[in-house]
Image (cartoon, rainbow, N blue to C red):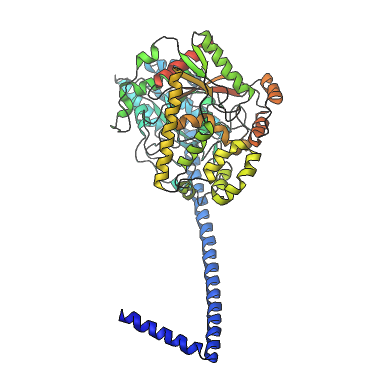
Amino acid sequence: MWVKYVLNSVFHGFRFIISNNPFLRMNWYIGIFQSSTRMLKVSVGICVIYITFRVFSDRRKKHLVKRTISIKLKEVCRNKGRLEQDLVSVNQSNHCEDLEISLLLQNLQDGHLSCLEVLRAYQAKALKITTEYNCITEFILEAEEWAKQLDADASLGGKKGPLHGLPFSVKDNVGIIGYDSTIGISKFISQPATEDAAIVIALKRLGAIPFFLVLVLNSFGCSNPIWGLTMNPWDKERTPGGSTGGEACLIAAGGSPMGAESVVTLEAVYVFLQLFVEYTRLSRPPQESVAPVPGIMARDSKTVVTITKLLLHDNHLQIHGDPDLLPIPWNEKMFSEKKKLKIGYYEDDGFFPTTPGIRRAIQIAKSKLEASGHELVPFLPPRVDYVLNSFINILTADQSRYLLEALSNDDIDPVLKPTLFALSVPIFLKRLLRPLLSLFSARLMPVYLGLGGNRIRETHQLWDEITKKNLYKEEFLSYWRELELDLCIAPCFACPAPRSVDVAKLSPALSYTSLYNFLDFPVGILPIDKENVEDQTKLEIEYKYFDAVCKLVKMTTKGATGMPLAIQMIGLPYQEEMVLCGMEALDAALRQ
């Protein structure tokens, strides 16, 4: 205390002397001015040095990123060259890659085809497909060794697994030991998985062989800065969808019999290609390291049913004692019981209007199911705009720091640029612009507010948002139970496959798939028909909306004649068997 008293006394003494002496007072002010000028110069100098350092540092990091990507691409190119060289002398006259999967599996079981023959046939076809459409990221070099081992074991009388020798492709975010899972982000290059994902191990134990990793995008669409753009085999100017467009492209073009994947968030694929898929949900079965929504995809519903049944039967996916996996075995009674189903349906979710072709696909599915003896009743999900906004709020609860840090030194994919722009706009400016945006596109508002105006700032706010999410789920289930539904059919997307250049601006149309990601419901997707000339005519006459995003949907749908039209079949949690039962019933009715 006494030190403080002495210092105060000295300070007040100097101030008294200076204030009573004009000459000293003037010199004091001059000294302060000169000192301030010097401090300003020093501050400006420090700022210039810091900014210069940051610019050069960022340039250096970007250069290193490009060098890392270049090295990776050269490595992949070498592996592709090795595989092409190995396949030069292969006799591909049996065309086993053209067989139906059930017949292919039967030939493998009977020994009419070897695992190596089948693998090489699919490898050869897949190489041609990726050369044309750019869908493969990594070539799994050990696949041939695994095929030879399976053939050797079989020749010695070893037991064959139910998927003995069946090749399968793997989405780039699913772990394969020794291979990167880059998801199109450079920071994940040269970080190979130390173990296989649970779904890969399960399929390998059933006798299947992983042989390629396929492209996954950073966002919605199908491109990323490392691997480039994947094209739709039905129309190269259109997207195959995302986030699993690489796998969808490969399977649709016949380069893989089936695929294993994991979907994290908003998925709009298979909708755009003639494919079948079944998504289980978070509790059954799991996927390490990501929010797990595993899926099995193939060109026919029978394959999807067979493989999903094998995975769930005897809890094959519980091989690691994964605590996230509920030990619920395959329910054969639910799947095979022949009963009249009560199925809800809707052509439009009340938030984003669908095109005439999509509405026609729902009506075809409805009439086919009714003709098979099932009861179809109207169903409309409540408050879809809230779902889209809340979903994005929860996904970006960290203010998207993880995403921004992961992409900090990468080139930004064009599809992601609008998202990153929305994230960078200050909240106060976003609120000021809200009335203007409402006039421009009311359907863009939930996405816009979720991305740029995330109201979650503290932990308790996140818990509040999750509580609201759970209350919405109860509201949805209450409505479902009130109608006594077994299943529901709905659009997957607002339109057929859009052009790749338009994808970035169509995120509100993801409301159809994001709803069931949000609710954590199992979903099956199956093709119904293709866009025709009549759909295009009705598009011009009927699809009249002033909303800017709807106008873009109309524009991008023009010329989509011949593109596949798909629907989704939704079931309740833990009722994958019911979803697959409904898919089989509808597929059978469509084939009649």
The residue depicted at 44 percent of the width and 47 percent of the height is 398
Where is residue 351 drawn, in percent x and y?
57, 30
Residue 99 drawn above or below residue 12: above
Q: On the rendered structure, is 54 left or right of 359? A: left
Residue placed most toward the observer, 525 or 301: 525
Where is residue 7 drawn, in percent x and y?
37, 82
**In the figure, residue 141 lies in which quadrant?**
top left
- State which quarter of the image contains the N terminus: bottom left
**In the figure, residue 201 lies in which quadrant?**
top left
Where is residue 54 drawn, in percent x and y?
52, 61
Where is residue 242 drawn, in percent x and y?
52, 34
Residue placed most toward the observer, 17 or 287: 17
Residue 90 drawn above or below residue 68: above
The answer to whether residue 101 of the structure is visible from this angle is no
The residue depicted at 35 percent of the width and 13 percent of the height is 333
Residue 428 drawn above or below residue 447: below
